Image: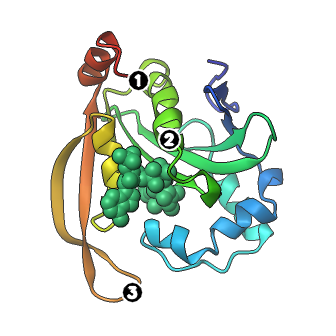
Amino acid sequence: MNWEPGKPLITQSERFIIRSLSAKDAGPIYTSWWNDAEIQKGFNFKPRGWDQQRAAQHIETFDNRKKFHLGIFEKQTKKIIGFFAIWPNYTKKVALTNICIGDKAWWGKGVTLEVRARLLPFIFNTLGMEKVEGEIHGRNLPSIYNYKAMGFTPEAVVREHLISPFGGRVDAYHFGLLKEEWLEMRKAGKL
Ligand SMILES: CC(C)(COP(=O)(O)OP(=O)(O)OC[C@H]1O[C@@H](n2cnc3c(N)ncnc32)[C@H](O)[C@@H]1OP(=O)(O)O)[C@@H](O)C(=O)NCCC(=O)NCCS
């Protein structure tokens, strides 16, 4: 995979180019996802009210070393359809990840499974992580199904761990995949 610490990552899956975003990628489409109520609800946020400059500032906080913000681009049209973020912790060797498919026409089409499967070798082999984890709020059903479909273990329900922007508190669900489990699944041809 074409990457060295601090430099942009670029790779591809069957249908997508996956590459580090830069400030100039903060166009109207990318920015609109931060202001979309349905998408932000998935992240347990209300629409952020960001303009393109604010969205570009967000992208610039990712350094391609300790934080990765990767755009998902459809190969044929070169159009951005979502992003995948990775936060590796080099001390614990555990990486936290999340995904957004901003273009809703791509929901239900296996993007999450394809992109996550492509990035797991980067996370485990290149970054040297020994575990990948995801934290989601307990009402994010598509994410729960996706983690389970990829063999992640539901490790914990952390009760009322998050403040809901809609009032009250919500549970956080933790999913985890160990490197050995991933290797086993690969050996069995499952990933
Ligand atoms: C979360 C997100 C990435 C999922 O998109 P996706 O990968 O296309 O997910 P799908 O719509 O295919 O749903 C995944 C699975 O959950 C199931 N599912 C979705 N909503 C469901 C519901 N309300 N009840 C039961 N099952 C549901 C789907 O049927 C699908 O199962 P299948 O693969 O067996 O058919 C996308 O909705 C998104 O970007 N949301 C906004 C941001 C977000 O929430 N990110 C995740 C937080 S880290």
Q: CA distance from mark 1 to mark 3?
A: 36 Å
Q: Left of 116 or right of it: where is 22?
A: right
Q: Residues within 10 Å of mark 2 (few under 14, many from 20)?
A: few
User: First in sequence: mark 3 or mark 2?
Assistant: 2
Q: Amino acid at mark 2?
A: Gly
Q: Secondary structure at mark 1?
A: helix
Q: Residue at x 24, y 19 (%)?
A: 180
Name the kind of residue labelled 1 in the image.
Answer: Phe
Q: Is residue 131 visible?
A: yes
Q: Nearer the observer, disc 1 or disc 3?
A: 3
Q: Which residue is mark 3?
A: 166
What residue is at 79 percent from the left and 52 percent from the top? 25
* Residue at x-position 50% and y-position 41%: 110
Lateral position of residue 23 relative to residue 14, left or right: right
To which residue does mark 1 refer? 124
| Mark 1 Cβ and ligand 1 under 8 Å apart | no
Whichever of labels 1 and 2 marks the residue nearer the N terminus, that label is: 2
Q: Give how far across and how far down residue 5 sits, in percent.
A: 61, 27
Q: Is mark 2 within 8 Å of ligand 1?
A: yes
Count of labels in the image: 3
Residue for badge 2: 110
Rendering coords of residue 41 (x, y %): 46, 73
Disc 1 crowd rating (10 Å Cα; few below 14, some 14-19, many 20+) is many
